[in-house]
Amino acid sequence: MIEAVGLTKRYGAKTAVYNLSFQVRPGTVTGFLGPNGSGKSTTMRMILGLDAPSQGQVTIGGYPYRKLPNAPRQVGALLDAKAVHGGRHARNHLLCLAQLSGIPARRVDEVLGVVGLQEVAKKRSKGFSLGMGQRLGIAAALLGDPQVLLFDEPVNGLDPEGILWVRNLMKSLAAEGRTVFVSSHLMSEMALTAEHLIVIGRGQLLADMSVTDFISANSADFARVRTPDTDPQQREKLTAALTEAGGQVLPEQDGALRVTGLPLPRISDLAHDADVRLWELSPHQASLEEAYMRMTQGAVDYRSTIDQRAGLQEQLPPGAVPQPQLPVPGQGQHGWYAPPPPQQGGQPFAMPQGAPAPGDANPYAAAPQPPAGAPAPEMTKRATDNEDAAR
């Protein structure tokens, strides 16, 4: 188990983490969420003894990381997938880590198989893609078969198959009774992977609860109701009945109704009593992303603004007329696709001079082949030139 008590970290006048207390229990995948700059990476570094807290303490199994006997066999971590010597083979990188921790060499081949890097085990890591680097980092974390695992953005750069593999790996590790602590910005993936959440903002704890409780506490569930579009009176009749029963009714842009304050069975009974036919009656629960955005909207330090492109464009001289946009031939027709960018100095999307009208022969089609036995035109010309030179 990981336990932080009053954890605080300052860098000069900047306070990255302030009075942070939480527990990461074994047997479940715990997600670690927060906006950029909220202190997630700093917290993970303090857990692993890479940064010393200014105040408070954090322990793993009751001990600070630096006092754990043979820590790599008890704690595995992936904080930076690029923290690898690019000139080493994947297997040699893991073998060096294994020898430093007294781990048998056969374990290296085992974890390479677990992460699917057997085919590239003898390739230098500098040629690895981002996803392959992530797999190598996960292999390093699993090397000592630890009981506590920390992962920072483990699915970054992975393809859909790799993301599914990481998700199942995290769940299987937690099912074995291990402590799994995962930081990620992918809310959809956290909703499928984590069972418990720790959310921080500007270095302070915002939430420490299950995923289900977090969504319920930071969102409002509602029912979506639709009546026949051909009969607006039924919609008005249902709105009056629901409002009288204590529900709150808001119209949707597509003509449906958003109803809060009433359970679905009650909405169905009211519609039946009012003799209103329903085309749709469905529950809607907010996603983890919606709940997260609602909770952390006041703790975001980096926000984008509208791109003021007008201030970046070159001003035209007085009296100049802007050039009209050139038409894109074929746009809107079946099978059309955007052409490649023009070469420097060329006109964007301009057709060559004398372009054929639609229906004419394709000027870029292959030239017709000469009859069998007839010399190619270019070859005939070269043969004539050679004969003239010989004379």
Image (cartoon, grey):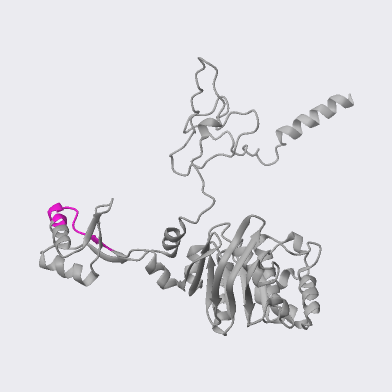
Q: Name the residue furthest right.
A: 390
Q: Position of residue 202 (x, y in %)?
A: 54, 59
Considering the image in quadrants, where does the N terminus appear? bottom right
Query: Is 194 inside the magenta-drawn segment?
Result: no
In the image, 370 versus 270, the foreground residue is 270
Identify the image quadrant of residue 136.
Answer: bottom right
Identify the image quadrant of residue 6.
Answer: bottom right
Q: Quick check: 322 above or below 24?
A: above
Q: Position of residue 340 (x, y in %)?
A: 59, 39
Q: Position of residue 119 (x, y in %)?
A: 72, 70
Residue depicted at 64% across the width and 61% down the height: 10
Residue 357 shown left or right of residue 17 in the figure: left
Identify the image quadrant of residue 267.
Answer: bottom left
Residue 238 shown left or right of residue 75 in the figure: left
How many marks can you see?
A: 0
Considering the image in quadrants, where does the C terminus appear? top right
Q: Position of residue 231 (x, y in %)?
A: 14, 54
Q: Quick check: 264 above or below 259?
A: below
Residue depicted at 57% across the width and 85% down the height: 176
Residue 222 shown left or right of residue 365 in the figure: left
State the extent of the magenta-drawn residues as a range.
223-236
Residue 171 shown left or right of residue 267 in the figure: right
In the image, 209 versus 287, the foreground residue is 209
In the image, 186 versus 248, the foreground residue is 248
Residue depicted at 81% across the width and 78% down the height: 99
